[in-house]
Image (tube, coloured by chain):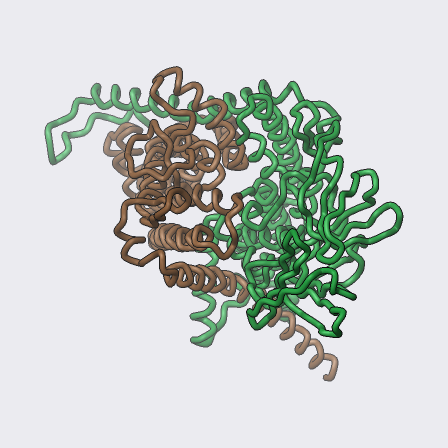
Chain colours: A brown, B green
Amino acid sequence: MLRRRIQRGLERLIIGLLGAAAVLTILTTLGIIGILLEETRRFFIMPEVSVAEFFFSTRWEPLLGEEKHFGIWPLVCGTVLVTAVSACLALPFGLITAIYLSEYAPARLRAVLKPALEILAGIPTVVYGYFALAVLTPALQRIDGSIETYNALSAGLAVGIMTLPIVTSLSEDALRAVPRSLREGAYATGATKFDVSLKVVLPAALSGVVASYLLAIARAVGETMIVALAAGGLARLTLDPRGQVQTMTGYMVQIFLGDTTSGGIEYRSSYAVAAALFVMTLVLTLIGQFVLARYREEYE
Amino acid sequence: MTAAPPTPPLPTGRPISRRSREVKNRLFVTVCIVSAALSVIILALLLAAIVYEGREYLTWDFLRNYPSRKPAQAGFKAALWGSIWVTAVAGVVAIPLGIATAIILEEFPPRRRIPRALHWFIQLNVGNLAGVPSIVYGILGLTVFVRMFGLFGSPNPAIYDEMLRIRLRSGEVIQAFLVESRGEDEQGNPTSLIVENPVTGLRELAAAEIADATRIYAKQHRFTLSDGRRVVGGRLDRSDDGQITLTTDAGEHITFPASAVTAYRTTNFIQVGDPDSFFYLRVPFGGSVLAGGLTLALVILPIIIIASREAIRAVPDSLRQGALALGATRWRVVWSIVLPASLPGILTGSILAVSRAIGEAAPLLVVGGVVLITFVPRNLMDDFAAMPLQIFNWAGRPQEEFRKVAATGILVLLAVLLAFNAVAIVLRQKFSRPLQ
């Protein structure tokens, strides 16, 4: 009797400990939000900045000159530009590769393609940064002489290569989850494989594909080492990918690598940038999760 | 499949001939193959470029040397060992926590309303954490682990007086600020250090004299002056004419000449053990192996949770029900049935997560991984370099030669990752057996 009671108590204790581990994930989120909010508040109460300037000014000049400017738009613009370039590569090619893998590819080709994509997904981002800087940029400069040493184009392409496996593997999962009966019904009406893939399977798996797109874009927005190496360090409000831009993450790297004093305004500004970045990726992942949850309900 | 009999035209739009549809199909296959080939070509190109650039410096010396200002002598030793230390800490912390969270989420779904809401929220939250950019985790690690919210810190929590505790070969121990490092030897390391003790002033130490040096963080400086006054403060400045200015905890500045000091000592951050020993600990952690490892643990925790959940979910319910029917408790079922059955999947996921930690640079960059380091960490409180950070530093330098060194570093990094993934594949094949 007593032994059983001790045993039961022990099990409760173990389950309690497991629960504590789970609560840690919530503490992590609360910690991130709390720290970003507090440091951003400290940034905004500094006399040199105002909330209005942060959101409405188009000049980001925190380090140079007499008068400092903290308008976040040039950094957002850099991030959007790099992300857009990456999306142009990763989204279409990732999806087409996923369709090929799921609908067309013979087993032998799959056996080559899947590992190749897995390796691409496992390569550290700093390696892609090196690739952009040492391989892509010189190659692009040979095509178009007006491309600068640091530019948004090669950084964006490298980010695209990095996110391509994410799109492919998540989209392929979604495409494969489409029930066989749907395909067979379409074939029975005389559809070609092309018709089946694009007009039956793809629409049925659309929410999964959209989710993969959103997650890939979120990764691109938060990507740090590639842009820190290849995109440059000049915050500019431009849509020309040939020149250098600074992204939000790129600015944070510049600050944390540099010699700015930790109480200084430039240092604090990196927290405000981090908060903006966090909100952007959070919104993207939340929508992605929501879409994914809906798609799961449909087929399970 | 494609040889289906002709069908009546679709109800909307113009009728489309069978031939044009076949042509479209074939065109699409071509597009597909080109697109799929693209990723293989990129991978081949990337690997070829790195091997081509990196082959020149790939020697055993590269693994044996410390970083240097001369490309030909630059080595990876500090970065390799730093990465091993930091990743080991991350794995040891994150893997048990991740598995525990996955078990709670999958095996103990709560029935009452409030725990159920919490359960749902944790699930959502894990998905979101996986999407948080790693540099943001770096900021979390900087505040929580490196500085510990300034709870143990000086009046200004963001600024510590960083000093060196130098042990000389003669046995003398000096605590002083580093002013400058001078000279450059064969490896590009400084030949002498100029340090400044608040009381005794400047002193030049030849590299040959120094047995070792550790970074310490002075929490408070305590002076006893010749008139009997005792002065305690958190920040210290020494001017050239020998005047010491101390900022007290109340924020006032006290100035006195160094010659009036009869005793000086510092209170450092709470520490256990000797800085040279294996078990040395202190709070706050500073930019140490422990701080870096814990930060990386947070980065990979959601990945481990998601992978472990998938592995646990794949265990057939019949196994659980069989054990329950024999009278096993729920925990007993988890421990003896579910965990052994899902172990290959959990291990594979954990290894992939750890290999992600090996390649992460951004959080370590924020937490303060140092690049020019010429020692291998001895304990959890030592500064560290890391492979991806070192590569980042080399690749970002303007000299062409350092690009090649960066490529060599990438080769080593990729080799380590490959070894890890090979272990994952072997584990998956060795342990996976049919469960039904």
Above or below: residue A47 compared with residue B407: below
Above or below: residue B243 compared with residue B205: below
Describe residue B187's horizontal placement relative to residue A297 as left or right: right
Q: Which residue lies furthest to the top in this view?
A: A142
Residue B121: x %, y % from top left: 43, 65
Can the viewer see residue A15? no
Q: Residue at x 61, y 52 (%)?
A: B342
Q: Residue at x 30, y 25 (%)?
A: B2
Above or below: residue B167 compared with residue A113: below
Residue A127: x %, y % from top left: 53, 32
Looking at the rendered image, the quarter that the N terminus of chain B falls into is top left
Q: Residue furthest bottom?
A: A1
Q: Would you identify the image quadrant in which residue B192 lies?
A: top right
Q: Which residue is drawn at 60% across and 63% down?
A: B322
Q: From the viewer's side, name the closer residue of B288 and A235.
A: A235
Q: Residue at x 50, y 68 (%)?
A: B109
